[in-house]
Amino acid sequence: MKIAPLVLSPLLVTTALAFPQTESRLHRDFRVEGEALQVCRKFSFGNLIDCGQTIVMGQPMHITVGTLAPDDGIAAGLAFVEHKDYTNEWRASWDVDAGATSNGSWRAGAYMKAYRLPSGLQYRVAPLFNVYSQSISLTRVDYFGLGPNSSLLNHTTYGFSENITGVNAAIPLQIGHGGPKIAIVAELNGRFPSVRAGSDASLPSIGALFTEATAPGLAHQTAYGEPSEGLRIYPAFLKDRIRLNYLVQFQQFVATGEGAYSFRRWNGDFSHEIPLYSWLPKSLSRDYFPNRAAQFSYDGPDDCTGSNASSNVSLARAATTKPNPAVPCPMIATTQKLEGAITLRAFLSESFADRGSAVPFYFSPTMGGSDINGTPMLASYPDYRFRGPDLLLFQGRIEHSLGKLPVGIFFGADEGKIGLRRDDVSLDHLRHTFSAGLTVHAGGLPLIYFSYAWGGNEGTHTTATVSPTLLGGSSRPSLF
């Protein structure tokens, strides 16, 4: 029996290249992936797994699948990935990908990640640099009004597009041998947003119920320069068995033109990871310290590249008989041991606008369901339910693997509120929700989520999402 899915066509066509007598690295990668795809021609359970892993995680080409944004569906597309290790101990990876959903939403971008490997005792921590240009177009983003008391009766929708071009960097510092670690983080983005009328026939467009006074930025969108700076502190205790991850960041959104929409934002994000056993789960990825990420976890099909993944690949494939050279990331496998962890998080975000300026509604954070980046907050409420310039959130979550299967169960609780003014962000009148569900993992990363949330006063919310990790593992800028 032969398998000939249409999705293989672009990959097979791309790999069917004429190679010169002296084969380059890129040509070799295409040849190896083309040879690996030959297993798709013969049906067996083992071939089916190998074929699927090559299609989704192969290099230099693979398909991309992932939830783009709440209510906009699952995007599918193609990604080109390449990497290079330099003799001066620098490593670089490149990713160009694009994906679209059934409702007409899409995202396309080019990303580069570069970092230096640790070098013995002289250079123990690695600086990280990301350069990117990303464009996204979302057909449906919901808007209920600003503030904690917005009404379900004002449920409207709009379309949103944005190009983000920029660079960010993290320069980790280590104080003493085994002492606390601090990363200086900085970012410089150009943002080019655009808002259009909603096209969902079941909901009124935003302009039918709201004006510039009730939705600042609706009448006019402008380009922004957005520098930011901050500190990330990641101490570890009890022989690295408990890790904290604290980020304090200050952003400046400088609008072009008259500057009526310029504002500043302060973020404080404080996460705590507590293992249920004497090790942390493999899924605890550390984007700001790639040497640790390479050793303990995997950042998706676009980041498990080169020699940094070789040890992980050999471990993951120790029990297999057919290594897949086209997939440098670990294969989908059992966890090998029970894993579980408790995560506690406190997050505070406050925005400041000068007299005569306002924070555009499309750059204000949201709570309810998931935000535009796909981060769940108060998940029992509708997506984007509460929106405002100031936010306070407390989250707790426990996850545990089901035996040695790559499946986990979780339970979470959220409390939080949205404010129109900084004085609104207080500990009284917090909304709360609870959630429970399943996660399906691959290579240590949770890739598919099934969640049921309850506890708010507006009903329940059931979601099934595919992690955007498969849309490419390189660093993605926030949409707000």
Image: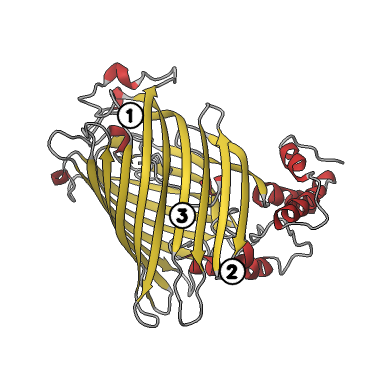
Q: Quadrant of residue 396?
A: bottom left
Mark number, residue 337? 2
Report whether 87 appears left or right of 145.
right
User: Which numbered disc flags the more N-terminal residue, 1 or 2?
Assistant: 1
Q: CA distance from mark 3 to mark 2?
A: 34 Å
Q: Is residue 233 above or below residue 369?
A: below
Q: Is residue 393 above or below residue 170?
A: above
Query: Label 3 sits on what residue type?
Result: Asn
Q: Quadrant of the N terminus?
A: top right
Look at the image and tell me whether residue 269 can be seen: no
Mark 3, secondary structure of its residue: strand
Q: Nearer the viewer, mark 1 or mark 2?
A: 1
Q: Report the residue marked by disc 1.
A: 143
Q: Report the residue marked by disc 3.
A: 130
Residue 228 point in image, percent of width and height: 30, 52
User: Which numbered disc flags the more N-terminal residue, 3 or 2?
Assistant: 3
Query: Label 1 sits on what residue type?
Result: Tyr
Mark 2, secondary structure of its residue: loop
Nearest to the observer: residue 84 or residue 136: 84
Query: Label 2 sits on what residue type?
Result: Lys
Residue 35 point in image, percent of width and height: 80, 52
Q: CA distance from mark 1 to mark 3?
A: 32 Å
Number of other residues with Cα within 10 Å of mark 2, as a class: few under 14, some 14 to 19, many 20 or more = few
Nearest to the observer: residue 395 or residue 231: 231
For image coordinates 63% across by 59% down, the residue present is: 329
